[in-house]
Image: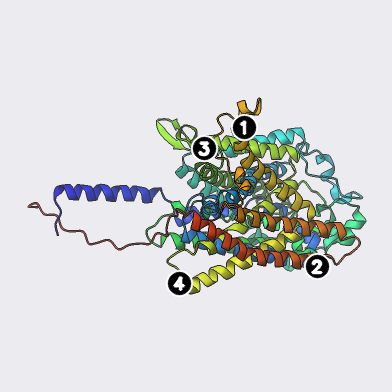
Amino acid sequence: MTLGRTGERDLACENTAEAADERRRLSTLDLVGLAAGGVVGSGWLLAAGPAFWGLGADAIWGWVAGGALMLLIAAVMVELGIAVPKTGGLIFLPLQAAGPLVATVVAAGLWIVYAANPASEAAAMVRGLAYEYPWLLENGDRLAGAGGLGGSVARPYDLSNSGLLCAVAFMALIMAVNLLPQRRLIRLNLVVTVVKVLIPVLIVVCLWRYTLDTAHSCVPKDVWYLSGQEDTKAALQARAGHPKPQDFLYMVLGGSIIYAYIGFQAPLDFAGNVKRRGRGEAARLRWAVYGTLVGAFLLYTALQWIFGRLCGELTGDMLASPYAQFATALGGMWLVWLIRLNAVLSPMGSGIVFTHALTREVAALSRAHLTHRGLQTARRASFRFRGAEIDAFWMILLVNFTIGLVMLLLVKGSWEDLVALNSVPALVVYAMPGVVLVALKPPGFPGARRVLHLVLSATAFVAIAVVIHEAGWGKVWRGMAAVVVGSALLLGLPLLARLDLPFLGRLLRRYDARDHVSRFARPDDPAVRPVLLFLTHLAVLVLCTGLRDALDEHFPDVGLVTLPVAALSAAVLFPLLVTACRRYMAAVPPTLPGPRREVEQEPRATVTAGT
């Protein structure tokens, strides 16, 4: 077979377009940069102290439990990302499988998590500067000698007015970096990620040999001031290192351990933009997600071990990083300055990744008409700079900045409160991919693989329910209330815009999302049953957690009843949710991208001058 000049030209154009598209896609290194950049933020800097106070030597097992849970959740999400590779899939796929009502609840949780992250990382960046500028914190003058006080400082890390302004400036910086062209942003993130991962690795390498000398160690009661709890010194010392068995998972979530692992899903937010050639999309996603989580687990456990073995060198200063204090005591001033640099660089890098990922998820939400469609139109998505068109979704960035700013001000810049607001909604979002994976029954997978999907998804769904139950009432009600408020806004704003009320009508006149809340009035609507089951699942978790908190003082073992109820409820509701999703898809067939497989190209025919 030979080709004429026209056929040769068409083939060359096609190959050129395909090659250009491939160059724009994300490589394995880019995906690892996104995953590690999202995971390695402020959690490793700030979680070791509370974990050691609460769990003592068992704090390492807290990181093991958190890592195991995240690997389980990641396995489900990676399988879904491979089966249905879609950028913005955390919102798009629940929309296709369960309908717009469930997708709205998931979108509310995801928006909260991704918008709260830059705010929490900005607060962590301010704390990273507080060793030099104590006036950035309201109680900065007391924290330098906190170990010598008679009790804990109430809300020790609330930012002062100057600190809040500094945090807002950091949030603006994170937003400004996301205005870069995507390729430059990905490369910058990769450089930042390499630096911010290398520094904690250096901490482990340089300080490891000192851990062999028990003279540097301490007991949990010696770090009572790092507990994050409000009480007297004597009471906190008495509680240190002696958790009840049922409090272990509470320490995993309440001690910010789960928060330190959140962010692994960043490559899955871009699953539709992964390079196809070579090892393929599936292998790249697995390497990025699993490699990051395993690496984070090894790094976090090593850092926790170092904290426990060197905490005798702490001076009672709550302003300076514990690892910087270890390096100072052992004579490594160069390492001290690297740690101080990373106390700002590491949170900023994580905030950049979350902000970038959120623009794609909100764009998917906007395209589905679940929020204002104008957020992702060309006029509000791109801008021209030096003659080049940059797709930065600048309007979404402004909206997200506003939401994060409101969260920051509401909690006065408290990193702990922002983490509490972040963790529970994140677990709500992580609960749905397993339901979607089993309900979709993606083609191209053998029966054994589908059985594995079912086992992984059901186990993850129940495990998430158990961890939410153990998180404690204070964190659960705040996180669930945030999801409720976000869902109410996303569902209610289109209705208010349609009603055209005297004052709100003028403000919402151009808000053009579709009205889905009215579907609740039609019980036969296939989108209603999945959301009612999902809301029932969340309501049972809130009820069990609330009962445990209310009755714990008089019935200390009430958790032994409410925990099995929460787990059993999740086990029962999971198959019901899957069935409801399949009924929805039977009524409204989904439009899904299929997994791309490498195809062998036909050998190119020789073109001769005579053809």
* N-term mark: 4 or 1: 4
Marking on residue 446: 4
Q: Classify mark 3: residues with Cα within 10 Å, few (<14), some (14-19) or many (20+).
A: some
Residue at horizontal 59 percent and vertical 37 percent from the top: 494
Residue at horizontal 62 percent and vertical 28 percent from the top: 505
User: Is residue 330 shown to the viewer in this render?
Assistant: no
Tell whether label 1 touches label 4 (CB within 8 Å): no
Residue at horizontal 28 percent and vertical 51 percent from the top: 15
Identify the element where label 3 is drawn: helix
Q: Position of residue 337 (x, y in %)?
A: 66, 47
* N-term mark: 1 or 3: 3
Residue at horizontal 80 percent and vertical 38 percent from the top: 138
Identify the element where label 1 is drawn: helix
Q: Classify mark 1: residues with Cα within 10 Å, few (<14), some (14-19) or many (20+).
A: few
Q: Find the residue positioned furthest to the bottom.
A: 448
Q: Is residue 499 above or below residue 601?
A: above
Marking on residue 373: 3
Residue kind at label 4, given as amino acid type: Pro
Residue kind at label 2, given as amino acid type: Val
Q: Nearer the viewer, residue 451 or 603?
A: 451
